[in-house]
Amino acid sequence: MHLSTTIENCIARRQQLASQLAPGIVIIPTSKELARNADTTYPFRFDSSFYYLTGFNEPDAVFVQIIGENTVQNILFCRPKDEEREIWDGFRYGPSAAADTFGFDIAYSLDDIDSKMVELLKNQPRIYYPLAKEMRWDRQINRWLSSVRALVRTGINAPDTIVDVRTVLDEMRLIKSDFEVGILRKAGLINAQAHIRAMQFTQPGQFEYQVEAEILHDYYRQGCRAPAYNSIVASGSNACVLHYGENHAQMRDGELLLIDAGCELHGYASDITRTFPVNGRFSGEQKAVYDITLAAQYAALEQCKPGNTWNAPHDAATQVLAQGMIDLGLLKGSLAEVLETESYRQFYMHRTGHWMGLDVHDVGAYKVDGQWRQLKAGMVLTVEPGFYIRPAANVPSAFENIGIRIEDDVLINETSHENLTASCPKTVAEIEATMAG
Ligand code: GLY
Ligand code: MN
Ligand code: MN
């Protein structure tokens, strides 16, 4: 992907943001590099909103936008050029090249940020920034604001309103452009291939981390430099731990393996879960629970269309799962009673999805004016029902420790949806054939 295409998109988003805000100053910082230990750092990951507006991938930078009645100025603060540091740590743009390359009206060195920000804040009516996201930025903005307030007797006005910029920005990020959909589609394909590789590799006696290595290998090989979140490779009873991440168990014949793993491509996530038998063949009980979960996922997918509410897929999946729990003899009572008392939560305790984009759990409100919002073309969400059977008095031993989740990523389009991860095998027959191959 060409940097220039990314930047064109970022410039359009800056204009779109400004057009939705009353005059004032927007301040959006990126992340900092985090120490892992001693002199080593975690791999740097930009702040998603900062990157969405700038395309700039260096730590510690700050995006500033000055919105006047009829003018917009886009400013970047970034690390200065530094020959010595660049010998050790690599290239950095520096303000001048960063402004040219990334389409800013002007860029300044971070060394000057305190004095420049006080200048920029003078006489601004309001500040837009991600309020209460990071304490250090709340404090920093308060410090700059106090410096401006100290000048009021010279006739300078300080901003008197702080607005959370996310109210507008998150709604922009919620609706994906064709450019973003192209990346998400490709991430979905890469991720599906990695899950297929995992299915074909898995055998009794291997360790969960060996399967994880196969998945990460496929991500890296295809240009995804990081997973979008920590991979869950959970065999046997570990599959009933929703956020299991140790991935250190030896896999045994007869167990299921639940893999929830996603790659990140150009900043965008993919998020697939597949569950399959370690030995390549589902047992009768495993198949029964699997097919109920799959039917729940199909029912949820059917609800993924414009005009339906956010909650419709969850309600559809929950109904199918609850009926399945009754049919298997795990729960007593009628479907209405099980739904009313939420007794199904013993085996299905999470929701059926989340928005997905630059963040795997992406931004955007789920309710508007107190009501579940309507699905709309351009929204991307996951559909991920699960069925987790921990040992309990009402659980026959044959069902104990079966844990299943099936997760795909879906783009809402004008008429229904596109499954971005459809190329990953999902039915019992498809999975068994893939593993046999
Ligand atoms: N892997 C995170 C999720 O599925 O929500
Ligand atoms: Mn997932
Ligand atoms: Mn998910």
Image (cartoon, grey):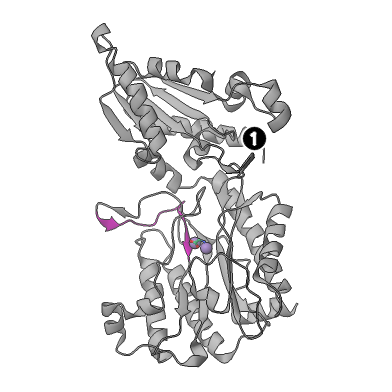
Q: Position of residue 228 (x, y in %)?
A: 57, 53
Q: Position of residue 187 (x, y in %)?
A: 62, 54
Does residue 363 lie above or below 161 as drawn? below
Label 1: state its secondary structure.
helix
In this rendering, would 341 be left or right of 181? left
Q: Which residue is mark 1?
A: 3
Q: Position of residue 166 (x, y in %)?
A: 37, 40
Work out which quarter of the rendered image holds the C terminus and state it.
Answer: bottom right
In this rendering, would 340 be left or right of 199? left
Magenta extent: 370-383
Q: Decide which of 288, 379 is in the foreground and name it.
A: 288
Res 91 seen here: yes
377 within the magenta span: yes
Does residue 273 lie above or below 152 as drawn? below
What amino acid type is highlighted by mark number 1? Leu
Q: Decide which of 125, 412 is in the foreground and name it.
A: 125
Work out which quarter of the rendered image holds the N terminus and state it.
Answer: top right
